[in-house]
Image (cartoon, grey):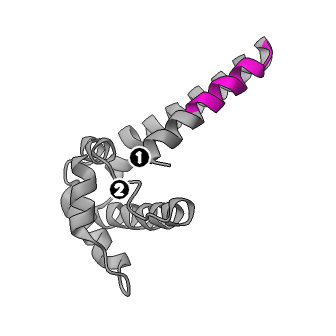
Amino acid sequence: MSLDELNKEIQKDYNKYLSSLNTKEREKHLKESKELEDSFKSFWSEEYPQLSFEEKVRYWEESTYRGMRTQGEAFADEYSGFSKKWYDSAKENEPDFDRIFKEAIDRFTAGFEFDWKEYEKRIQE
């Protein structure tokens, strides 16, 4: 199953879940979802810009390591989380993303060969 197919299945299941809730439960769930979304927006607009270069490298190092590990375990494809949409979002939130990401990858790949060609292919799709 591709990532797009999985996302469609997740959306279908989520819609089914929402329709199973009564009005009060649905309102509570949607409120909590909005609060979570607002916290992500706050992180990217307020907290992340205040990080030093070193802290930004560590952020991308840790999140990329966790993401690749999770994708590898779930899909047997460590690179499945990389896409044009992901890359565009990263660039939108971090104009210096390419330099920071390169530094992050260089740090966490000791003993692991990061496939830059595969990465480049995925972020173009």
Q: Nearer the viewer, residue 65 or 77?
A: 77
Residue 62 placed where, x, y %?
A: 44, 66
Q: Are marks 2 and 1 in contact (CB under 8 Å)?
A: yes
Specify whether 40 is left or right of 61. Answer: right
Residue 54 placed where, x, y %?
A: 31, 67
| Tag 1: amino acid | Glu
**SS type, badge 2:** loop
Residue drawn at 44 percent across, 40 percent down: 4
Which residue, as the protein is rendered here, is positioned at the far bottom? Answer: 111
Q: Which residues are magenta?
A: 11-22
Q: Nearer the viewer, residue 42 or 97?
A: 97
Count of labels shown? 2
Residue 102 placed where, x, y %?
A: 23, 68
The image quarter in which residue 101 lies = bottom left
Residue 47 is marked as: 1
Judge the density around disc 2: few (<14), some (14-19), many (≥20) Cα neighbours within 10 Å: few
The answer to whether residue 96 is magenta is no
Taking 1 as reference, is 100 above or below it?
below
- Magenta: predominant secondary structure element? helix
The answer to whether residue 16 is magenta is yes
**SS type, badge 1:** helix
Residue 51 is marked as: 2
The image quarter in which residue 110 lies = bottom left
